[in-house]
Each structure stands twice: as C-alpha cells, then as structure tokens.
Amino acid sequence: MFKFLFDRDTWQEVFDSFSKNKLRSVLTMVGVWWGILLLIGLLGSARGLENAFNRLFGDFATNSVFIWGQSTGIPFKGFQEGRRVQLSLTDTKKVEENIEGIEFVVPRNLRQTSVTRKFQSGNFRVAGDYPLLDMVEKKRLLNGRFINQNDINNKRKVAVISEDIYKQLFEKKEQAVGQYILINNINFKVIGVHKLSNVNMGPPIDMHIPFTTFQQIFNQGDKIGWVMITGKPDYDIVQIEQDSKLLLKNLNNIHPDDKRAFGSANAGKEFGKVTGFLTGMQFLTWFVGIATLIAGVFAIGNILLITVRERTKEIGVRRALGATPFEIKRQIVVEAVFLTLVAGILGIITGGWILILLDHLFGQGDDAAIVNASVSILVVFIALFILVVLGTLIGLIPAFKATSVKPIEALREE
Amino acid sequence: MLEIKNLHKSYPIGDSSLHVLKGINLSVKEGEMVAIMGSSGSGKSTLLNIIGMLDEADSGDYILDELPIKNLTEKKAAVYRNKFLGFIFQSFNLINYKNALENVALPLYYQGMKRKQRQEKALFHLEKVGLADWAHHLPKELSGGQKQRVAIARALAANPKLLLADEPTGALDTATSHEIMAFIQQLNDEGKTILMVTHEEDIASMCKRIVRLKDGVIMEDKPVTQVRASQYV
Ligand SMILES: Nc1ncnc2c1ncn2[C@@H]1O[C@H](COP(=O)(O)OP(=O)(O)OP(=O)(O)O)[C@@H](O)[C@H]1O
Ligand SMILES: [Mg+2]
C-alpha cells in the first residue's frame, strides 16, 4: 500500500510542484517551522529550568520537613499559654515508631558558640548531628569524611567544618583535616571540610559535631532542638507533618489546635510549588506550541487549496490521461505531509540550535539558570507523528476538492 | 469499434435546461478517420467529451470496443481513458513545468510502467513526431506546432485504440495545421481510429468521413475522398 512512497516518481511529482511554487511553499512552511521551533525551544528551556532547579535541590531530600519547638498558644490541661516547648529524643522515637510513611527521623541540636584556632576566633553555629543527616542533606565534602556511627558511639570530639569557616580559621592551602580547633574551649579534631549546599532548610550550619558529643559537652540530656523527618517516596510529606505534629502535641500536653507550639519548614510543600509551576510552564508550552503548529498546518492546507484550485486544469489533464481520483488525492496528501514534515524537521533542527545557544549563554557554570536544556527523543517523535497526522488530515481537504469536479469541468477551467 | 445509439445530453441552465444532443446515432469502425463539423454551439465538443468519457450522457447507449460505457465509476473511467483513448486538445494542455519527454511519459506513468521503460517509450514517440532533440525542453520553449506534436506524441504514448481531437489545429496557422494533419493522417494510415472536431472545411476534407451536427442531431454523415495534407507541406 505504501509502495508509492518508495517510488521516485512520487517524489519527482512532489519536487516538481514544489519548485513550481517555490516562494509559496516556503512561506507556507514557515508556519509549521515556527510552531515546532517554539515547541522545541520552550519545552527545552522549561526542561533546562527544571534541571537547574533539581540541581539546586539535588543535595536535599525534597520530601522532608523540619520541626522545632516554640511556645504554646493555647492553655491546656492546667498549663498556661506561653510555655516553652522542648522536643526530646523520646519524642522522636515515638514519631518514628508511630507515624506511617516515615523514612528517616534525624534529631539535631544547635547552638551558637565560640570557636578558636590559634589566634583566630569567632562565634559560630555548631550542630550536633547524626550520620543520617547525610541522607537528608547530602554533604558535599571537599576533604575528609562526615560524622560516622563510631563517632556517635564513642562521643568523639571531631568536627566537620564548612568551607567558609575553613577560610576564616585556616591559611590558604593549609590542610584542615587532622588539625585541632577549640569549640567551647574543648579541643576538637577536624575530620572533614564540606561545601554548603545551594539550598538549606533552616540556618546554615558552620560546623557539625557528633550528636552525642554535643549532648555531653553542652549537657543537653534528652533535649533536642530540631527534628528532621523525611517521608518515603510514595507518601505525602504534608500529611506526615500533620500527623507528627499531632503526636508531638499529644506527647507534650499541648492543645491539638495549638498552632504556635511547633514551628516547621516543609521542603516538600515548597518544592511542590516550584515543580507545579514548572509543570504548568510545560503544559503552557505544549499548548502554545501545538496551537501554533495547528495554525501552521492550516496555513499549509490553505495554500494547498489555492494551489489545487490553480492546478484544476492540470489535474483535469492528468485525469484525461488516466490518473484515477485516488492517485490524484494521494499525490496531494503526500505533498501536504512532505511540506509539514520538512518544515517540522527544520523546526526541530533550528529549535535544537536555539537550545545549544541557550546552553552557551545561560547554561555554563555551577549556578547556571538553565541546565542541559533539551527535549527527549520521545517528544521529537511525538511532534513528528502529530505533524504527519495533521498533514494528512489537512491534505485531505484540497485532495477531495481536486477530485470533486468532473474531469471535463476541470479541463474547461482557464 | 464505437457504437452510439440515441444519445441525449442537456445542461441545466438555471431552472430550465439546454438540450444539446438530441438523439445521436453514430457508428465508427476501426481505422476510420472522422471529422465532426457543425456551427459553434452545435454540440461537437459535448459529443466528443462523452465519447472520451470525460462527461456522461443523460440517456442512450455508448459502446466502445464492445464495452458498454455507462455509470462508470471515476476510477474505471480513468482506467479506460488510459487504455483506450488518446486526447489531443486545441490548447495542447501540456503540463508547463514538465519537459516534453515527461509530458509524453505521463500516461505511461499512470499505467504503472517503470521509469526507464517509460522514458524509452516516450522518446520513441517524440522521435516519431520529429522532436527527439526537444525532449528536454519545457513547453514554453516550443512553438505552437511543436507543442501540438508533443501533445500528439503524448496521446499516442499509451498506444490507444481511438484518438480524439477537439480542434487540434484551431490554435495553429495554416502551414502548421497542414503539418499536424499530415501527422494525423500518417497515424490513420498506420491503423489508428481517429475522431476529430473541426470547423475548417479544408481540415475536414483531410479526413475520410464527415459528420455534420446541427441543433443536436446529425444532419449529414458521408464519406469523402481524403485530401493528403503532405501535398501542402
Ligand atoms: N458545462 C456546460 N454548462 C452549460 N452549458 C454548456 C456546458 N457546456 C456546453 N454548454 C452549452 O452546450 C452547447 C454546446 O456546447 P459545445 O461545447 O458542445 O459546442 P461546440 O459545438 O463544441 O461549439 P464550438 O464550436 O464553439 O466549440 C453550447 O450552447 C454551450 O453553451
Ligand atoms: Mg467545441
């Protein structure tokens, strides 16, 4: 059935009628070309933005929530309002045991304290952390390692410092790992230097020490400052946040409706907003691109209709010479599909160039606004498929027009 | 070869209709060369178009080579036209963006013939009309007489049984007309059946039989002694 597609004559005919109406054919193709260009360009850019965004959040478990205690807002069970709420390790254990869908619960203690090395000193934010933190906020270590279970078990006096602190406390190119610093007048060994992530929940941490060590030197007991909770992939982190808070309120004698008692920052919620925006943008892109595409294809149909009307006599002659209506129709449809496809492929190629250009302009470096702006092969194939379908459909109109008149009427046409 | 009985055709004009052919009876044998004459509007072209299956009669019988031609689908009509008929038009009707060779090869294309074979055959027919050297020229580079010769080659390409010509010399000067008629006569000598519409007496006299139409009926139908066109060339 499709043998004619491999026939040189079919294409000779297409080429002939193309070269006969060069300018018009080119003008027609501009519409489709532009539609595809728009589609590829916009989709690629949207993808690039998404990639940039993902890279920004890449070190960070996006389905996570941070919870910390504040002070109560409603009197409850004989307690006055304004009571300080203090989270404890016991609380976190209960949360981990009882709430559905939780992957990790990571407690943290935090304190501003003096840090000294040789003649440099300052007040820095020191956190007592578990190795599990690495699962929530991937640490990009420039040197050394992060806290491990051994450090926790032995309450070792070790610290992982941020790059900024390294620069403040150490000489250029000086090896930090293995050196000692004074935290709260206690000697700590530096075991790692890490780069701060682009995105942080809560305040940036200047140095991490083992949770247990923190407990000991600051005499924390069971108390904790923060808890970070991450949800399993399929679970809604907003729901987990609500459930956890309710449980924590119950454990701490707080009114269930008290909104002030716990503060929280839900990464999943924020992340969802941005991904929602990006999805919206992609949707818009498809909409705009396809609308333009359809308009372009209609333009092709329109031009073909005019061409067919102009070629009425020629078509009459062909029919007098023995062309069947089917052969005439087929030829016109092939022309329509060919024009749309060529225009579409040119659109894809130029769209690709634009993405390359965007990559050169905005896609370089670590904090690029657009990362790897591209469209998938699947999208390209979908676009081509849509073009073939639309081209065929739109070609059918002039095709039927061409064979709707009797050959004699076509021949009589001037 | 061709048998027409009581053929009627009318065209609707507004609410009324114009009765153009009012019972035509015509029989043409193989090898004949018939001129159809008559005043303007007498229905000559209408008759020829019906014979050529480009148009359909309202009533009456038309049998071509023992095939009754009635209620044909467009597809069948196309196949019959391709197989049985060759058309020569007054205004040549060459396809202007195709060169002479491609124009001649066109009926063969619709016959489904392979490209190479088609071009050989087309060239053969172009040679026959003396235009082999012009094979790769576009119609606009040819004179009227040359164009009509290309059209004749095209009509012959598919080796039809019946050649239909509507005023083939109507757009040509006398000398060129005679040249074309000499060709057509030669084709008839070789056995082709030819039907042509003309309103020039001297062209008609170059046929072997003259059919005169008047008011939609055949007024006169008689054989003539053929004047050879070659004597004028
Ligand atoms: N499609 C049509 N619709 C309406 N009337 C038509 C149509 N075709 C032809 N006629 C009319 O039918 C009549 C016969 O037309 P036809 O073309 O057969 O004449 P003709 O003998 O070939 O004339 P001429 O010598 O001028 O070519 C004319 O009056 C013409 O106006
Ligand atoms: Mg006429």
Image (cartoon, helix red, strand yellow):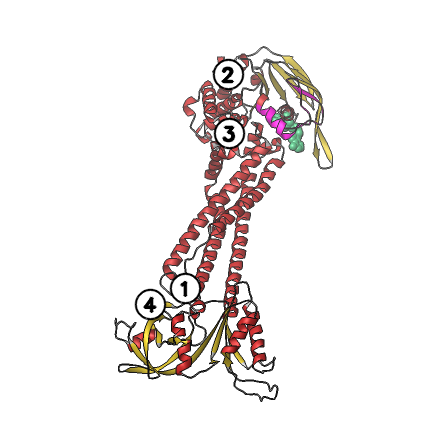
Kindly indicate whether the residue at mark 3 contacts the one at mark 1 (C-beta within 8 angstroms): no
Quadrant of the picture in which ligand 1 is shown: top right
Q: Secondary structure at mark 3?
A: loop
State the CA–CA distance, disc 1 to disc 4: 24 Å
Q: Amino acid at mark 2?
A: Ala
Q: Amino acid at mark 3?
A: Leu
State the CA–CA distance, disc 4 to disc 3: 80 Å
Q: What span is colored magenta in the figure?
A: B54-82
Q: Do discs 1 and 3 share a chain?
A: no
Q: Is residue B183 above or below residue A46?
A: above
Q: Which residue is disc 1 drawn over?
A: A369
Q: Amino acid at mark 1?
A: Ala
Q: Do discs 1 and 4 share a chain?
A: yes
Picture coordinates of residue A308, whole percent (x, y): 55, 39
Marking on residue B94: 3
Q: Residues within 10 Å of mark 3 (few under 14, many from 20)?
A: many
